[in-house]
Image (spheres, rainbow, N blue to C red):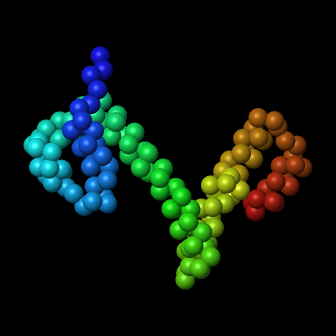
Amino acid sequence: MKRGLSTTQKKVVYELVNADVTGKTHADIAEEYGITERTLYRWKNDIEFAHELEQQADISLKSFYYEANQQLKKLIRSGHSEQAKLQGIKLVMQSQGKLRDVQDINANVKQDIVNNGVSKDELQELKELLGG
């Protein structure tokens, strides 16, 4: 049976999600809303409260997507470290599905060999291509 969160609980969820920005501790939040820290921790263990906290945290994190993209583009365009630029480029390529790990490719090739069978000549050619 859903009971819904109280107005105070909804405000506390907001405070918890934004604590990294506001710098408020659990003790600060509890004091501000006239509850004990123990109550705050009890709420965090309540399924309904925890679900709302998780939803609001997800929404908050999604709002960083734009900022993260901007910072990534800035890093790639004007980063001082070539290593940092390369890492940024790698992240962009991976997020777009354009860059795959060599181990993934090797695993896929080996699985295809197992599933579809390969002639000895094709197998030798694959080994040479893969450096083996």
* Residue 30, placed above or below residue 91: above
Q: Name the residue located 24 percent from the left edge and 43 percent from the top edge.
A: 12
Locate the C terminus and report the quarter of the image it occupies. bottom right
From the viewer's side, name the closer residue of 29 and 121.
29
Q: Name the residue located 31 percent from the left edge and 60 percent from the top edge.
A: 21
* Residue 56, placed above or below residue 101: above
Q: Is residue 37 left or right of residue 49?
A: left
Residue 31 appears in view: yes
Q: How many marks?
A: 0
From the viewer's side, name the closer residue of 132 and 26.
26
Q: Position of residue 49 (x, y in %)?
A: 28, 34
Locate the N terminus and report the quarter of the image it occupies. top left
* Residue 74, placed above or below residue 44: below
Q: Is residue 98 left or right of residue 65?
A: right
From the viewer's side, name the closer residue of 33 and 46.
33
Q: Name the residue located 54 percent from the left edge and 58 percent from the top edge.
A: 66
Q: Name the residue located 17 percent from the left edge and 36 percent from the top edge.
A: 42
Residue 101 appears in view: no
Residue ranking furthest to the top: 1
* Residue 111, placed above or below residue 24: above
Q: Position of residue 126 (x, y in %)?
A: 82, 54
Residue 19: quarter of image? bottom left
Q: Position of residue 103 (x, y in %)?
A: 65, 54
Residue ranking furthest to the bottom: 80
Q: Position of residue 39 (x, y in %)?
A: 13, 38
